[in-house]
């Protein structure tokens, strides 16, 4: 029997909530930090003493000394991007040693043809919408994540990190894969020569050799760590409302990014998790296509975007902004089994005379519900029911304790906790580590 001792950190909205900062903060209390899903389409930004680090595949815990970071089997790995991140940290004086980073030999590899397929399919779907058909373009980052997960399900067409270490096996696999993928890309309108299996095998075997010191069986490594009494911290990428099964389908990502993805993405049972911290932005944002009931297309939304610097870590594209949807957050907290909340970017709301919270949905037939719809078609038809609460004029980015919070800010946190049914234990008032308030008495407890 494994004693529950692990902590999970998970986003409760559509991503970009500030998970990286909280993982970095909590890493000091844990021994092993584990990434269990997603790929280089996700981006975590961490600020330490004014220095900004943008990470895409490496767990945020890599910035904490004497911690082991694990890229689990549920992650799809772009070897080129991973090496770029390792090199970038080295150039900034942070060497990533093999004992500090373990990459699962079962993680699936993002290949160049996955990126080509991703971009070409998005283009085809967008053109169909231009001709009056339904817009089925997801708005992906075109990093090849979805097609890589599709190959994982196809099985025979998949390449895993362990395969990169055996050039003969890799070449035989790519001979078949490239022949199939070349025909598919041609059908999608990609004007390029057929894929060269020999060249790809040589290139990706070389990448595998560079990463070989890090590649291992992480399932056994994680079980060994649990048996040794190590404390684990699970770092989710993306967020619950983008979960392939429980998000706003089909405008979701390609993996289980709720806490439900931890067991298949790591090989550990869910029973090891003792605490789950749900990360909530103090307002709402979304990137790409899909319904966003609380989106504000006016001056308030623009003000939130500029004050919150709401531009993607990975792509730089502007995020859609709006007010906090408590119906959605409560749903995500339920699915993920949250034991506490961390409310991020609270400082962005300073200066608003009033704030709006969505506490229900009005349906097309006039009925009202406080239940979320994890279906894009249904969610697109709802009208938010608003609760207006007082804002606060004071800037709060320099305060260090909850007793310094304006009364309205404290009341705002109270309302979130009361509606979601989960205490707020952390409030972030800026991007730096020091701009974090740990509640001595959890709000809503």
Image (tube, helix red, strand yellow):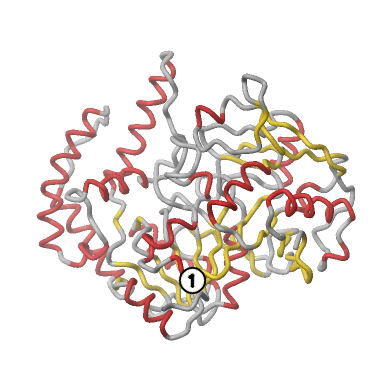
Locate residue 79, reporting x and y percent: 33, 59
Residue furthest bottom in the image: 228
Q: Is residue 352 left or right of residue 264?
A: right
Q: Nearer the viewer, residue 366 or 201?
A: 366
Quadrant where the C terminus sits is bottom right
Locate residue 424, reporting x and y percent: 72, 60
Q: Residue at x 50, y 71 (%)?
A: 62
Q: Residue at x 50, y 69 (%)?
A: 273
**Residue 274 falls in which quadrant of the image?**
bottom right
Can you identify the residue that label 1 sits on?
A: 33
Q: Is residue 156 left or right of residue 65?
A: left
Locate residue 393, reporting x and y percent: 89, 48
Quadrant where the N terminus sits is bottom left
Locate residue 399, reporting x and y percent: 83, 64
Assign a secondary structure to mark 1: strand
Relative height, residue 431 to residue 366 (above, below): below
Q: Nearer the viewer, residue 411 or 214?
A: 411
Relative height, residue 250 to residue 391 (above, below): above
Crowding near the residue tagged with mark 1, few <14, some 14–19, many ≥20 C-alpha atoms within 10 Å: many
Residue furthest top in the image: 132
Q: Residue at x 41, y 70 (%)?
A: 70
Relative height, residue 28 to residue 38 (above, below): below
**Residue 97 falls in which quadrant of the image?**
bottom left
Relative height, residue 417 to residue 123 (above, below): below
Q: Nearer the viewer, residue 326 or 101?
A: 326
């Amino acid at each position: 029997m494994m004693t529950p001792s692990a902590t999970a950190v998970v986003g409760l909205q559509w991503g970009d909530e500030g998970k990286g900062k909280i993982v970095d903060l909590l890493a000091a209390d844990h021994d092993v930090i584990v990434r269990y899903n997603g790929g280089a389409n996700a981006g975590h930004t961490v600020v330490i003493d004014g220095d900004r680090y943008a990470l895409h595949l490496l767990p945020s815990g890599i910035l904490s000394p004497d911690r082991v970071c694990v890229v689990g089997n549920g992650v799809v790995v772009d070897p080129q991007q991973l090496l770029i991140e390792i090199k970038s940290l080295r150039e900034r004086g942070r060497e990533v040693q093999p004992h500090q980073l373990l990459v699962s030999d079962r993680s699936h590899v993002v290949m160049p043809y996955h990126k080509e397929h991703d971009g070409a399919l998005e283009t085809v779907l967008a053109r169909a919408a231009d001709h009056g058909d339904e817009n089925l373009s997801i708005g992906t980052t075109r990093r090849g994540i979805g097609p890589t997960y599709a190959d994982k399900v196809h099985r025979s067409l998949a390449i895993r990190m362990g395969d990169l270490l055996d050039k003969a096996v890799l070449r035989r696999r790519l001979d078949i894969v490239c022949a199939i993928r070349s025909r598919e890309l041609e059908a999608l309108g990609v004007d390029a020569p057929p894929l060269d299996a020999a060249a790809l095998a040589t290139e990706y075997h070389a990448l595998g050799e560079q990463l070989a010191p890090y590649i291992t069986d992480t399932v056994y490594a994680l079980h060994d760590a649990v048996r040794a009494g190590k404390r684990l911290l699970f770092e989710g990428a993306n967020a619950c409302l983008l979960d392939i099964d429980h998000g706003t389908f089909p405008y979701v990502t390609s993996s289980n990014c709720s806490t439900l993805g931890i067991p298949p993405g790591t090989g550990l049972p869910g029973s090891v998790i003792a605490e789950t911290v749900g990360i909530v932005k103090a307002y709402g944002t979304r990137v790409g296509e899909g319904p966003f009931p609380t989106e504000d297309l006016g001056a308030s939304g623009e003000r939130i975007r500029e004050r919150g610097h709401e531009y993607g870590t990975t792509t730089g594209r502007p995020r859609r902004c709006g007010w906090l949807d408590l119906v959605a957050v409560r749903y995500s907290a339920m699915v993920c089994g949250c034991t506490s909340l961390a409310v991020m970017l609270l400082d962005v709301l300073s200066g608003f005379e009033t704030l709006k919270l969505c506490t229900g949905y009005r349906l097309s037939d006039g009925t009202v519900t406080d239940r979320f719809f994890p279906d894009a078609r249904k969610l697109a038809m709802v009208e938010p029911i608003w609760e207006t609460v007082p804002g606060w004029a004071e800037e709060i980015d320099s305060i260090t304790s909850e007793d310094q919070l304006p009364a309205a800010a404290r009341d705002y946190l109270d309302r979130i906790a009361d509606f979601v049914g989960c205490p707020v234990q952390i409030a972030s008032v800026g991007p730096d580590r020091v701009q974090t308030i740990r509640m001595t008495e959890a709000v809503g407890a």
